[in-house]
Image (cartoon, rainbow, N blue to C red):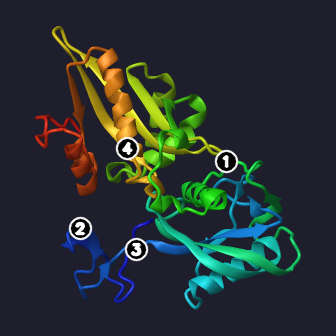
Amino acid sequence: MAELTFCPVCGHTLGTREEGGRLRQACPNCGYVHYVNPVPAVGLLIEKDGGVVLIRRNNPPHKGEWTLPSGFIEADESAEEAAIREAEEETGLKIEITEMAGVNSFPEGPPVSGIMIFFRARAVGGELRAGDDAVDVGVFTPENLPLLPFRTHREAIAQWLAHARDGTPISEKRLENEDFVIRTAEAADANEIMALLQLIPANRGMTREQRQEVTFRLRELSGVEVFVAQTRQQPPILIGVIALSVARTLTEGVGYIGDMAVLPTYQRRGVGAALLEGVMRRADRLNLRHLLIASERGNERARAFYAALGFSEARVMHLKLR
């Protein structure tokens, strides 16, 4: 989100100061503090003819790709009112909300940090037609769903599929080995991996050039091995990623884990443990004597997770070059 230049209250040039544990823009003249908060939005799982309604986007980001109907909430409307409005604007359908399907967040954007409220709904009128941000609209059954470009939409679809299959929400179910597989990452996974990596607090705010560098490393760098957790359901989605870098000295080999992320919907479901177990098996085959984790890149919950798996809490001494 772009920074302000002038105070919106008195017009004075803004400076910065620490407020609430963060460095924020603030006005030295009147005391105004500029807080940057997530923008609320709604997403819709409109059930129709045994499937779910998707729209093909007419504008960036992800122009030309299929997504769930969604949009930002106006200041003078409730989340439910926004959902009903967005449904009619983008799909031509008048809907009735049946339940709130879940809440997710996208601090990584695009285009800004936001909170997404998903609703399940059914059509009660109108005519299915593309409108507003959509150039096409259609009903997709579980067997022919495309891979959606937005991470939060993929998670919502995964929850919808799980509920349609056995009525059990993902949040109440520990995943078993038959629910997902750990495999080596492929070039085609780059976009989904990038979305996962931006869940790591230290990776937020990456520039376009930095994202391009990561994509290059995924495809070209031989010293890094990347593994992903992928659901077995259709369409399959990546629910976790871990990267192992290998360094060898004259006397020993060391493995370093700098990036590990799991989709919020799938956290505390055994995915992270499975990814680490896969990397540990790989490290053993490579005859590595030590496995290091950059725990400071994660939050308190991530550090507690590593400690529970046997990693020590001591930090490795290092020199930051830039």
Cα–Cα span, label 1 and label 2 = 37 Å
Q: Amino acid at mark 3?
A: Asn
Contact (Cβ within 8 Å) of mark 4 with mark 2: no
Residue located at (44% from left, 71% from top): 38
Q: Amino acid at mark 1?
A: Leu
**Which residue position holds label 1?**
147
Please tell me whether mark 4 sits on a helix, a strand or a loop: helix
**Which residue position holds label 3?**
37
Residue located at (65% from left, 69% from top): 70
Q: Position of residue 195 (x, y in %)?
A: 50, 48
**Which residue position holds label 2?**
22
Q: Residues within 10 Å of mark 3 (few under 14, many from 20)?
A: few
Relative horizontal placement of residue 270, taking residue 19 as reference (left or right): right
Sequence-first disc among 2 and 3: 2
- The answer to which of 49 and 117 lies nearer the viewer is 49
Sequence-first disc among 3 and 4: 3
Instruction: State which mark lies toward you, 1 or 3.
Output: 1
Sequence-first disc among 1 and 2: 2
Instruction: State which mark lies toward you, 3 or 4.
Output: 4
**Which residue position holds label 4?**
272
Cα–Cα span, label 4 and label 1 = 22 Å
Sequence-first disc among 4 and 2: 2
Question: Which quarter of the rendering shows the C terminus?
Answer: top left
Q: Quadrant of residue 289?
A: top left
Cα–Cα span, label 2 and label 3 = 13 Å
- The answer to which of 236 and 28 lies nearer the viewer is 236
Cα–Cα span, label 1 and label 3 = 29 Å
